Amino acid sequence: MSIAHGIKRLGVLGAGQMGTGIAFVSALHAKVPVLLHDKSAHQVSKGISLIDKLLAKDVSKGRLQPSDAEEARARIQTVDAIEAMRDVDMVVEAVTENLDLKRAIFREFAAKIRPDAILATNTSSISITKIAGAVIPEGVSAAGEEGKAASGRVVGLHFFNPVPVMKLVELISAVQTSQDTLDRSRAFAEACGKEVATSQDVPGFVSNALLMPFINEAIMCLEKGVATRDDIDKTFRLGMAHPMGPLQLADFIGLDTCLFIQQTLYKGTSDSKYRPSVLLERMVDAQYLGKKSGRGFYEYN
Ligand code: CAA
């Protein structure tokens, strides 16, 4: 028997590509009302216009009835503070990858959001256990009932970009995560139309522990002149049927994000196989961040 996710209202923090995509699939497929917040009003309006465009495209392709698109759109409401998410059953955080920032946000969630709500992070490599440690009130024992209840509701729910297209959600359990949180989070991801793969809380989880060394090796091949950019990417597009070659994919993910994940893997394991290539570091130093900045391994206009 499938487990009910019990999410009647969702909060999404961060209206970048990931947060917007999560709001979109939650409203459209899981049909739950979504409260979307970002500290940047500009980011919120960009996110909302992306949602409008995605719904309009689905209608124009005949995949969605106009009335269903209107209903999905009406489920998404923007709010200007975390306080407005007080009564949600689950919140998904999708802000910049920074441990201190995430720990501060989760402390704020713990103080402001209903104590039985699930607190999920979309992080692609930061330890869920470290984030969960932040929600235990000062003076409370992590191993006692109160501490366990506080941190047991924290979970990793890692969506992939573009969220409306990619079929996977990686479900990561912190050391502290309760079985109920895991079961309901899985059920919610499935209601969003996704398949779930689980991973332990190791640096990069399964997805990035495997993807990032691959991308890094591709950058090193380019750096050493083993092959041209186009031939490296062509090898994987045509030889292995990847939708994008590794250099194009790195641009798509964002070179700063790739570097951050690689640094997290390297720091978290001390394994030299994760050491970021000098070329990747220099590209980020130069602010050639990939598609989002107009230039990475490719140029974009
Ligand atoms: N948002 C929503 N939909 C998008 C989109 C976006 N940003 N970009 C493309 N799409 C949709 C298009 O609208 C199109 O939909 P329809 O078929 O309904 O028209 C569909 O995707 C295909 O797009 P295109 O025809 O324009 O282009 P394509 O066939 O080259 O596909 C792609 C684009 C889906 C991005 C494909 O190239 C792809 O799958 N690339 C690999 C993406 C990938 O590996 N993502 C994971 C990155 S790793 C990550 O996210 C996690 C991490 O931790 C780093």
Image: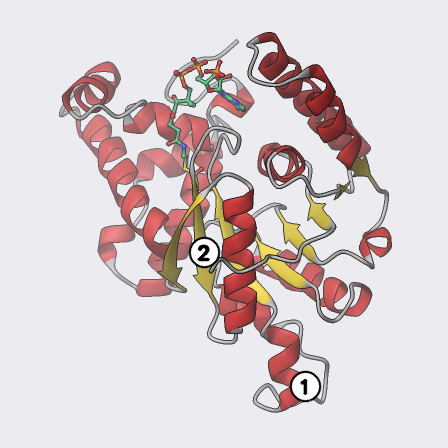
Q: Is residue 285 left or right of residue 265?
A: right
The reply to whether residue 204 is in sight is no
The image shows residue 16 at horizontal and vertical percentages of 64, 35
> In the rendered view, would you say 185 is above or below 300?
below
Vertical placement of 267 versus 240: above or below?
below
User: Which residue occupies 56% across, 60% down?
Assistant: 184
Give residue 253's position: percent from left, percent from top: 45, 33
Q: Dot 2, crowdedness within 10 Å: few (<14), some or many (≥20)?
A: many
Query: Which residue occupies the foreground of this view, 160 or 117?
Result: 117
221 w.r.t. 92: above or below: above
How many residues crowd mark 1 within 10 Å: few (<14), some (14–19), many (20+)? some
Q: Amino acid at mark 1?
A: Glu
Q: Is residue 71 above or below residue 231?
A: below
Say whether residue 234 is visible: yes
Residue at image coords 61%, 69%: 153
- The total number of labels drawn is 2
Q: Answer left or right for 267 relative to 33.
A: left
Disc 1 to disc 2, C-alpha distance: 24 Å
Ligand 1 quadrant assignment: top left
Q: Could you say where residue 298 lies in the image, as x and y percent from the top left?
A: 39, 16
Residue type pointed to by label 2 = Leu
Q: Secondary structure at mark 2?
A: strand
Q: What residue is disc 2 on?
A: 171
**Upstream in the sequence, badge 1 or badge 2?**
1
State left or right for residue 109 relative to residue 190: right
**In the picture, residue 117 is in which quadrant?**
bottom right
Q: Which mark is residue 222?
A: none
* Contact check, label 1 and label 2, Cβ < 8 Å: no
Q: Residue 186: where, in percent of width, then height?
A: 49, 55
> What SS does tag 1 mark?
helix
Find disc 1 in the rendering and name its residue: 146
Q: Is mark 2 within 8 Å of ligand 1?
A: no
